[in-house]
Image (tube, rainbow, N blue to C red):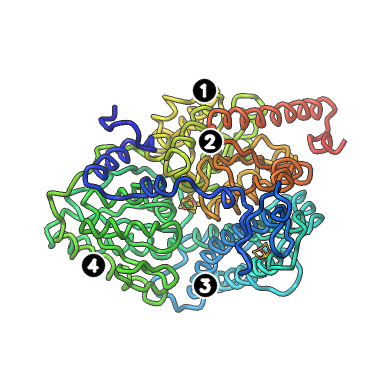
Amino acid sequence: MSTAPTGHRTVDLAAREMLDLAEAAKLTTSFDRYKAQQPQCKFGQTGICCRICIQGPCRIIPTKPGQDKGICGASAFTIVARNIVRMMAGGASAHSDHAREIALTLLAVGEGHAPDFKITDIKKLMAVAKRVGVPTEGRTNEEVAKDVALLALADFGKYNNEPCTWLSTNITEERKVKFRHTGIAPSAIDRSVVQLLHQTHVGTDADPVNIIFGGLKAALADLTGEHIATDLTDVLFGTPTAVITDANLGALDKEKINIAVHGHNPLLSQMVVYAARELEGEAKAAGAQGINLVGICCTGNEVLMREGVPSVANFGSQELVIMTGVLDSMVMDVQCIAPGVKDLCNCFHTQLVTTSNISKIPGSVHIEFNEATAMDDARKIVRLAIKQYAKRNPALVKIPLYKKQVVGGFSFEAMTDLFAKLCPENPISVLTDAILAGEIKGVAAFAGCNNQKTIHDDATLTIARELAAKDVFLVSTGCAAGAFAKAGFLSSEGVEQFAGPGLKKFIKRLEENSGLKANLPLVYHMGSCVDNSRVATLWTAMANNLKIPVAQLPFVATAPEAMSEKAVVIGSWVISSGIPCHVGVLPPLEGSDLVYGVTTRIAKDVFGGYFIFETDPVKAAAQLYERLENRAWKLRIYADTAAKYQSTPAMAFEG
Ligand code: NFS
Ligand code: SF4
């Protein structure tokens, strides 16, 4: 199919075409810079380089007397544990600071000083209020919104020792007890991060297990923040429902002004969507056929889920969008924006626009985005792109023809609606019954990034193909969803090609009753990375319905191409929740057998979830499937026994 030479480390055909072009034009991308970084330092790679104080760096050589400890006497296990949990603190900070901005905006809406925002989803507002205990009776939507926002903000910095509200109201009773017993339920998001940085300061905690538990508390703070972000974003902009759109570079339109939104926080990108619609006329007056808004990474996922904005790239292919020569503006907010995009913008006419005061790139245009002036800021941004269009060089235009249909928008609510068509009284039982009947073997959630250490998109697609063939139901978020979108896995094409007979039957049954204009996809796109909260909501609902602990549920997770600190922290709350989690890139843990063993084995005894580190995607898929099969087998035995003795499966477990 591809005319591209082999050798490019990607399976995305559009990306290959762009990398050919980069090679011919001698343009440098992350793909080249990865090669230039080889060989990477093995101390760093295995986690035994400590730079926590400036006596260091201390590099540990376990076999060399005298160098088997840092200058302060820290052992490899302390250093490895400290390094990894500090990554978790970084991830929790990124997610929860994003959540805080959403909460502050909802507060401003409630208080009446964010004129461009409104409460779009009243039903969700009321559902959230009810769940967290905010009274709704006889009150205006704004009053309720204000109290919900204040309660969410309290989860960041309250002083009492009660667990965070958005954690305790979103997990099973069994997990609440588990987190209390293990002392990892955070009472405040900010505090758990600050405490972790304190705990890992030179000369504080040297006990690796204690350090890891500190890390897990921050991980649950991350989960809390993700739930806040998802809930309140849905209130502001609407809970996603099934939506049909396109993906990959072929979704760029050379007749239109192309604006890419890139980053994570939808407060801005959502406003750009509105402004682009409004200024369509100005774009036409400038000689274009209109405005084509596209998304990259997770802010792209947010507007894909809610507005059907096409996704053109995930983390690994973000730079390549610029090389099409038709991207007039790249508008970024925060997180996962490779600074390398600026160098490429310099070679094309693309204008890079930064919008956050904590996320700037030298040489780009900065238009500060403020909640009080949101629409005006967004209009400014769109008008700048319209101006930039005139500078396009037709000689540099090259859009690869690859484009796939995407059926996305599967929030937990949208999934439930789909199931409700078959069983309105108890929608989630549609999924759990299919597992009990053996029609599908369980659920696998795909999350996470791209990582130059792997072949771009390959592991994600390979594991999905393997599991789909074995009748595993697949959901996804983040850049993994981006990979699926570009490759046609988010459309019925994926079902036809890769679904095993049971999975196909299950999907077709949903499809016949879906009422949607398109056939259902192979993989269910649940949103951005903060929307992994939706995945957690899914497994919580399944466990509650089956009356079993999450740790017994045939549910696995995988981050085949994990890269960011956010991925590290997500994986950590996934395993704490009781879910086995595969990671396809080796994290810096190998420098300590003890820490490695805690994450892959001891975690299982304590939480039921644990990490599986495997760089071979086919082997990884086999391991994930084995976990599902094992859990499903036990579940069926318990369910049968329970039916026979007229008890519940939960009682069977207790016995
Ligand atoms: Ni998640 Fe989304 Fe992508 Fe990874 Fe970055 S964009 S928040 S961190 S790279 S999936
Ligand atoms: Fe070295 Fe200890 Fe300082 Fe780390 S904290 S850099 S091991 S002296």
The one nearer the camera, 221 or 324, is 324
Mark sitting earlier along the chain (4/1) = 4
Mark sitting earlier along the chain (3/1) = 3
The local secondary structure at tag 1 comes to loop
Q: At label 4, which amino acid type do we have?
A: Leu
* Mark 2, other Cα within 10 Å: few <14 / some 14–19 / many ≥20: many
The local secondary structure at tag 2 comes to strand
Q: Nearer the viewer, mark 4 or mark 1?
A: 4
Is there a contact, CB below 8 Å, between mark 3 and mark 1? no
Q: At label 2, which amino acid type do we have?
A: Leu
Q: At label 1, which amino acid type do we have?
A: Gly
The residue labelled by disc 1 is 500
21 up-or-down from 198: above or below: above
For the residue with label 1, is its CB less than 8 Å from the closest atom of ligand 1? no
How far apart marks 4 and 1 lie (CA) works out to: 49 Å
Looking at the picture, how far across and down is residue 524, in whole percent? 49, 39
**Is 226 on the left or on the right of 17, as rendered?**
right
Q: Quadrant of residue 103?
A: bottom right
Residue in the picture at 59% in, 36% down: 614
How far apart marks 3 and 2 lie (CA) works out to: 34 Å
The residue labelled by disc 4 is 384
The residue labelled by disc 2 is 474
72 up-or-down from 631: above or below: below
Mark sitting earlier along the chain (2/4) = 4
